[in-house]
Image (spheres, helix red, strand yellow):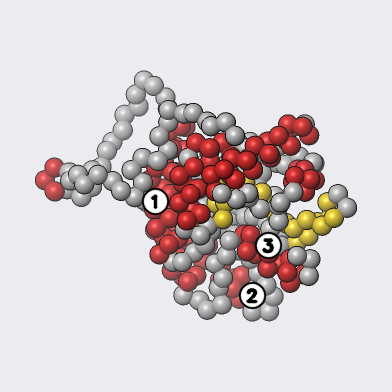
Amino acid sequence: MASSVSDRDFRGYGDAPPAIRWPGGARLAVVEEITGVRDLCMESHFEYGPRAGWPRIRALLTQYGVAATLNANGRAVALSPWLVQEAVADGHEIAAHGWRWERHAHMDEAQERAAIARAVAAITEAAGRPPVGWHTRSATSLNTRRLLCEHGGFLYDSNAYNDDLPFLVDVAGGQHLVLPYAFDTNDMRFQRGGGFVFGDDFARYCIDAFDRLYAEGGTAPRMMSVGLHLRIIGRPGRIGGLERFLVHAASKPGVWFARRDAIARHWLAELGTS
C-alpha cells in the first residue's frame, strides 16, 4: 500500500515528555488563549487525541487490566501506525472504522467496496493482522453488510444501536453477527448539547447504566458498550470520570472487560455457528 505523507505530528511527546520544570518549580502552567490569525482549530482538536489523550487512556486501561477495541479509520492508521502498534502490543483489538471518517449512505457500490478494502489494507499493514470488526461512521448504505461479507474476514459489525446483546442478521444467504454500539454511555455527550459537562457526569451516567445491566445480568446476559474518543475523554478535566467508572466496574464480581472480537467469538461459539 502506498504510504501517506503528512506534515502533521500526531504523536507529540507520548508518554515521555521532556524533563523540564516551570519557573519557580511550578507544577502546572495555565494559559489563557487569544485567537490568532490562522485557523487550525479542527486539525488541532483531533491531533490532541493521539498526542495527549491516548497516553492517558492507555495508562488507565493498563492499570485496570482492560482489553479494549479501538475503532480506527484506515487513513488515520496510515498516518499514525505507531499508535496501532502500541495498542496491539497492549493486547487491544483494532477494528475498522472506515477509510475516512465518513458516511457510507451516499456511496455507490464500487466506491464503498474500495473504501472497505483500503481500510482493511491500512490496518493490516500497521497491526500485522486484518480487522475482524467494522463500524461505519453514522449512516451505512444498504449494501454495507453484504460488501463486508463479500470482502471476507469480518466476524461482526457494530452498525446498530438497538439492543444490549449481540444478534444475528441474514445477509446474502448467510448469517452475520451484529454487536450493537451505544451513544448514551459515550463521551461524545461532552460535545455541545450532549448533556455532559464534568467528568463526574460521564462517571455517574455510565455507573447507573452498569448497575442496571449488572442486576439484569443475574438472570440473562447483558453487554455494555462504553464509547471513548481520545480527543474527548482524554482531556485532563474528563479522564477522572473514566477512572471512576473503571474503579466501580472493576470492584464487582462477574464482570468481563472484553474486546468486541472476543465477545463475537464467544457468542458464535455458544450459538454453535463458529
Toward the viewer: 188 or 64?
Answer: 64
Residue labelled with disc 1:
55
Residue labelled with disc 3:
264
Residue appearing at x 17%, y 46% in the figure: 21
Helix or strand or loop: what does disc 3 sit on? helix
Toward the viewer: 41 or 94?
Answer: 94
Residue appearing at x 62%, y 64% in the figure: 262
> Going from the N terminus, do you reach mark 1 or mark 2 first?
1
Residue appearing at x 88%, y 52% in the figure: 173
Q: Residue furthest left?
A: 24
Q: Is residue 146 visible?
A: yes
Observer-side mark, 2 or 3, equals 3
Q: Position of residue 119 (x, y in %)?
A: 63, 40
Q: What is the quadrant of residue 168 in the picture?
A: bottom right
User: Which amino acid is tagged 2?
Assistant: Gly
Say whether marks 2 and 3 touch (CB < 8 Å): no
Q: Position of residue 257 (x, y in %)?
A: 54, 67
Instruction: Indicate whether 64 appears above or below 93.
Output: below
User: Which amino acid is tagged 3?
Assistant: Ala
**Mark 2 → mark 3, Cα distance in angstroms:** 18 Å
> Going from the N terminus, do you reach mark 1 or mark 3 first?
1
From the viewer's perspective, tell me whether residue 69 is left or right of residue 200: right
Residue labelled with disc 2:
217
Say whether marks 1 and 2 touch (CB < 8 Å): no
